[in-house]
Image (tube, rainbow, N blue to C red):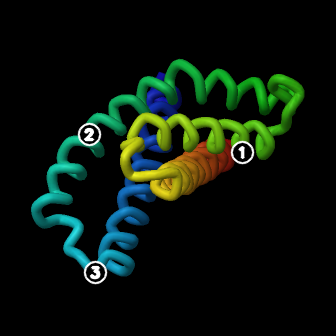
Amino acid sequence: MKTKIIETIFPPVCGILAVFAVLALYNLIVRRGDAFSYPDRGFFNLVIPAATLIALIVQYTLALPLWKRFQLNQKVMGMGLIEFTTFVCLFSGMFFGFVFWEPGDGIGELLFITLTGVVAFAVYWAMNLLTLKWLEKYRN
């Protein structure tokens, strides 16, 4: 039971923190802003807790069962772990782009938001899966 709780909480939190770090770094370097000042502070104060809650639910209901299945069969829907994760990141990033895109901003903005989503999901899932792998190695 203790292992299940750790596998449910620790990898998503590591993933969210990694995405948070990348977003803050992007904000500081590219936008030359302070990621923790107004108006960006509202984004971090609202989105990070909501994303963490969603990540915990997804981790428990989908990621852990799929992780166990990958360990046993090495394939899900005919894809290996890398292919499946790439597909999930691309699909999630496109969904993210369409949800947060303002049509008046043009196609360029859609592409930028979609790319941002793909990168964020890739960072999240890479950290999540590496943490799960590390926990598995540590347990054995």
Mark 3 lies on residue: 32
Quadrant housing residue 90:
top right
Is mark 3 in CB contact (under 8 Å) with mark 2? Answer: no
Q: Residue 120, percent across and down?
A: 50, 53
Which one is earlier in the sequence, the residue at label 1 or at label 2?
2
Which one is earlier in the sequence, the residue at label 3 or at label 1?
3
Q: What is the spatial separation of the Cα atoms under label 3 and label 2, in whole angstroms?
A: 25 Å
Residues packed near mark 3 inside 10 Å, few (<14), some (14 to 19) or many (20 plus)? few
Q: Is residue 37 left or right of residue 19?
A: left
Q: Is residue 123 left or right of residue 81?
A: left
Residues packed near mark 1 inside 10 Å, few (<14), some (14 to 19) or many (20 plus)? some
Mark 2 lies on residue: 49
Mark 1 lies on residue: 86
Inspect this view and state whether residue 69 appears: yes
Badge 3 marks a residue whose secondary structure is loop
Quadrant housing residue 30:
bottom left
